[in-house]
Image (cartoon, grey):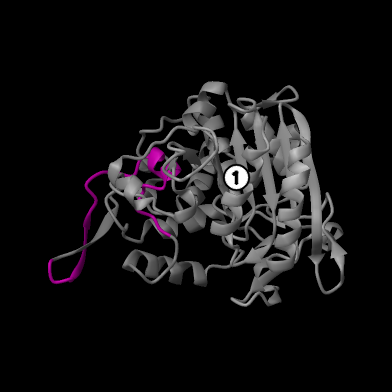
Amino acid sequence: MKRLQERLTPLLKEWVVKGPPGCACTIVKNGELAYQEYFGYAYLEQQIKIQSDTLYRIYSMTKIVTCVAALMLYEKGMYLLNDPVEEYLPKFKNPQVFRYNEFGVRSASPASSPIRIKDLFTMTSGLTYGGDNTETERLTRILMEGADNTKDIRTLSKALADIPLAFDPGTHWKYGTSHDILGALIEVLSGETFGEFLKKEIFEPLGMTDTSFRITEDKRDRLCKMYDRTADGELTPNSKRDASYQPESRFESGGGGLLSTIGDYSRFAQALTRGGELDGVRLLSRKTVQLMATNHLGPQQLKDYNWTQQKSYGYGLGVRVMMDPADGGNNGSIGEFGWAGLAGSWVLIDPQEQLSVVYMQQLLPSLEPYIHPRLRAVIYGAID
């Protein structure tokens, strides 16, 4: 695809001047490598260039892996999407919800319904991330700040179950720790640790040899440096983001804990592009991938799901799903799906066009609302 080289390469070169010090992009179309380039530096101060084996913190791109793993157990009949979570994780029995009266006085009372497993997939559980906007967010922040890497995902899920929800399950959409709880569910159903299950069922079969929750010493020099960017474009190294990847860490976050290379994650994306199978390894059936990439949000939840860069998208089982290209001025396909990571990594999966795109960088803030829509526009603009 000559037009990809002509249009995408200058754009990525521009970004490593104004944004992240380095980035990489791999595009596969109809099973063939259409584009693969690396620009800039993995470690700016030491002039270490981005390479094919550079490791990245993929943060929330972990979520797609978690949801695929959970759906593999769904396909084995081990649960149904509408099952209450409490049937498998008893600490979530009789959840409480924070409510406010007309005077703003807060109280907690029983939820109108249990959290369903589907609510974990779709971020409609009432669980949140840490923050200061609501009491649920505040208590979650305090819990997460006090947690350390000796805690496993089952221990964290039990602690999160004690925090009243931000809303009745199924009534709103709110980004949060729901996919971490899916990791705990996978452990209960499989009888293995979350990391062991992913390694045995996904990473080893697909040949994703560099994808894991921890980094060994022999790979540490391949880890891309994280950079903080000021408003005027100044970059400074951020070394605080590496603690959870230590070999002794027990915490395996289903919401954001994986390290990966662009090649590894591209194989995972290709499997989903092809309906759940790659090189004779089948993760999911074509029908289950279709279910994953279908919008599951109702009108109120779609109003809650209002991120600028997600305009024209709904939300499926752990992924954004293209619903209305015209609404977002988007030249992509209806049914395209994927997600992004905190530091700017991004995946696009388009079964209709047999197209997968994986982009990697390590920058905070990530400039996601600027970078990702432009990537999509250029890539689809190069398709014949």
Residue range corresponding to the magenta coloring: 102-128
Kindly identify the residue that appears in the image at 57 percent across and 22 percent down: 285
> What is the quadrant of the C terminus in the image?
top right
Q: Is 43 on the left-hand or right-hand side of 370?
A: right
Q: What residue did someone put label 1 on?
A: 377
The front one of 352 and 70 is 352
Specify whether residue 179 is painted magenta.
Answer: no
Specify whether residue 123 is painted magenta.
Answer: yes
Say which element carries label 1.
Answer: helix
Mark 1 is on which residue type?
Answer: Ala
Is 96 drawn above or below residue 363 in the view shown? above
The front one of 381 and 339 is 381
The front one of 376 and 300 is 376
Q: Quadrant of residue 129?
A: bottom left
Residue 195 in percent (x, y) is at: 65, 46
Kindly identify the residue that appears in the image at 12 percent across and 67 percent down: 102
Q: Quadrant of residue 272?
A: top right
Q: Is 323 on the left-hand or right-hand side of 374?
A: left
Kindly identify the residue that appears in the image at 70 percent across and 43 percent down: 265
Q: Is residue 77 visible?
A: yes
